[in-house]
Image (cartoon, coloured by chain):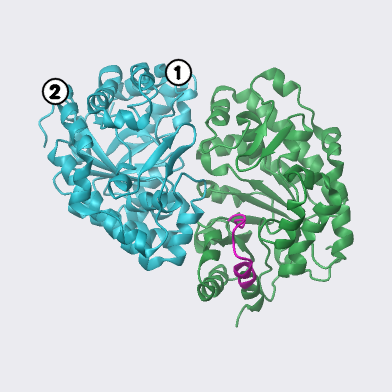
Chain colours: A green, B cyan
Amino acid sequence: MANVKNDLFLRAINGESVERPPVWLMRQAGRILPQYRAIRGSLSGFKELLARTDLAAEVTVQPVDELGVDAAIIFSDILVIPECMGLDYNMVEKRGPLFEKVISCGQDVKNLRYGKSAAEELEYVFDAIRRTKVLLEDRVPLIGFSGAPWTLLAYMVEGSGSKTFSKAKKFLYQEEALAHEALSVITETIIEYLKLKIENGVNAIQIFDSWAGILTPDLYDNFALPYIKRICEAIDSVPTIVFAKGAWFSFDKLGSLPCNALGVDWTIDPQWAKNKAPSKVLQGNLDPCFLYAPEDEIVAKTKDMIKTFGGSHIANLGHGVYPDTPLKAVKTFVNTVKSCKYGS
Amino acid sequence: MANVKNDLFLRAINGESVERPPVWLMRQAGRILPQYRAIRGSLSGFKELLARTDLAAEVTVQPVDELGVDAAIIFSDILVIPECMGLDYNMVEKRGPLFEKVISCGQDVKNLRYGKSAAEELEYVFDAIRRTKVLLEDRVPLIGFSGAPWTLLAYMVEGSGSKTFSKAKKFLYQEEALAHEALSVITETIIEYLKLKIENGVNAIQIFDSWAGILTPDLYDNFALPYIKRICEAIDSVPTIVFAKGAWFSFDKLGSLPCNALGVDWTIDPQWAKNKAPSKVLQGNLDPCFLYAPEDEIVAKTKDMIKTFGGSHIANLGHGVYPDTPLKAVKTFVNTVKSCKYGS
């Protein structure tokens, strides 16, 4: 196990019995922190912050300093993988990512760069990781992440965000063989990317399948689960978390993946999740909007959540924290988790 | 039961044993039909089509003529309720609805018009229903609909569409009493509106809770289910369908509502739905994107769906048909359902 001063997160994700759940928040390195907004405001755009590895490292560490969370997660984006594979994107303010080229035919898939040589293009991410490790001084573990193959393919076909991702789903229904071909090279690239992240110092990995919930159970079986499994099998040196948002319908199958932990969104009852995936550590699952509630309700609900999970649990929200969440509420959440003790 | 020539839909929704499932599609009166696009293209906007009751009636009947579906659904919009309550909206091309005023404080709720006098403002909808009945000549039943109270409140607070509706959810967490006050007057207005729709000739009612899936089970219990129940109790002269998209977590509770049928989205396995809501007719649930698949796969999947529901079923998609769906695929779906016979 990594040599960090606060190893609560690593002990919990490895299934050890711990004194309280560790706590961190998805999107903790972001707009909820005034320190982040100051840095972000001085730059021309989101992608400049990814490229400025000194600043990416700084914003990664900010929530450790400000909130006292038990883990840091490297500031980055899931779309760096499509980019290193040859599909560049722009992050358009208030609209989201917009790709210049998309995958629509066999030639588009053949044109993709992939594997180790593609992943190595992301040197700025690895540099940010190394710089983060220096700033962290081994206080807490550092989480690295990737989008899941289906979620990345969804963007690479759709070319932007979407409520339905109907163009990407059409691709699955009309071009099954091509979709598998694309998913294979995406998966291979993700694996090399995550191995390089680990070599450069991350202590755990989270896979975000952000668009899992728009697939049918059949599509999820066919186009998502096998590729996530391949990633989990390839990553054996650090613990892994799979967060397939909205994929309640496949939760038992997610529970059979060779990963350590599963993310749980706020629509899922903790007890239900425990029954479906008894061998997994579970991470989540407070509704991010609950942090708009009055302080005393946040305290009560957080305690209630910890009690209901009852162990084998990493405290987090059920989705990324929303940018306009009051900092005070985030601190209340973190501090409430840290004040809890199992069995008392 | 209404005196219509093809009463298959009504017999099925009333729980009678039928020869095959009736079939219709959510959003069947819309862009999938060239006839619709011709009419829509001649007008300045979506809301003009709502106001032009002769044309609204015409597009309502088009899918009966063109597709041979077993039911028509009145061409309208769920947001006519907020409008008659005093919150006007514009439908912005490619962006969706945009409200000028929203609910943000107690005075905003007090300012709302509601109940019968508000519902009566929607005379253009009732006129469209009467015109539709003339055009339909009792060939098939006509379905009327409303948004569910939570979904309407979500728009009335958020002021637009949203991926997270975090502003609306914040309102639930911060202004519980006010939210209940607003939901009560919205519910009262919906009931009066639906009664007027029934008086003017609709033969069944569908309640769309389009944003059910972004709530937690607790929020759904508190802010959604009691109001839908109130509507179902008030509508006793025609059969009712409740479609709470994404609310798998409350499906058993939806199964206890005093309605006839439940909508089933494509993430839900039909057998699972039957177990959770054994007393309900189920409506759905083909993935709308499946209509992009090759013809033979649409045929096979549709037959498979009918077999899995195995009766007490209204064939439909798991969500509204997407505008760019090939007309041929829609016809294949409808014709496949119509070619099926239970027990053969």
Q: What residue type is labelled 1?
A: Glu
State the residue in front, B334 or B57: B57
Give how far apart the Cα atoms at labels 1 and 2 are.
Answer: 33 Å
Q: Are marks 1 and 2 on the same chain?
A: yes
Label 1 sits on a secondary structure element that is helix
Horizontal and vertical percent position of residue B59: 28, 24
Left or right placement of residue B147 versus residue A19 in this view: left
10 Å neighbourhood of mark 1: few (<14), some, or many (≥20)? some
- Label 1–label 2 contact, CB within 8 A: no
Horizontal and vertical percent position of residue A305: 54, 69
Horizontal and vertical percent position of residue B31: 39, 24
Based on the displayed image, in which of its 4 quarters is residue A172 positioned? Answer: top right
Residue A260 seen anywhere in this rendered image of the structure: yes
Horizontal and vertical percent position of residue B114: 24, 54
- The residue segment tinted magenta is A319-332
Which residue is identified by label 1?
Answer: B295
Q: What residue type is labelled 2?
A: Glu
State the residue in front, B180 or A74: B180
Which residue is identified by label 2?
Answer: B137
Instruction: Give the chain letter at badge 2.
Output: B
Based on the displayed image, in which of its 4 quarters is residue B335 positioned? Answer: top left
Q: Which of marks 1 and 2 is in front?
A: 2
Left or right placement of residue A176 versus residue A122 in this view: left
Image quadrant in which the N terminus of chain B is located? top left
A329 to B326, vertically: above or below? below
Q: Does the magenta stretch include residue A324?
A: yes
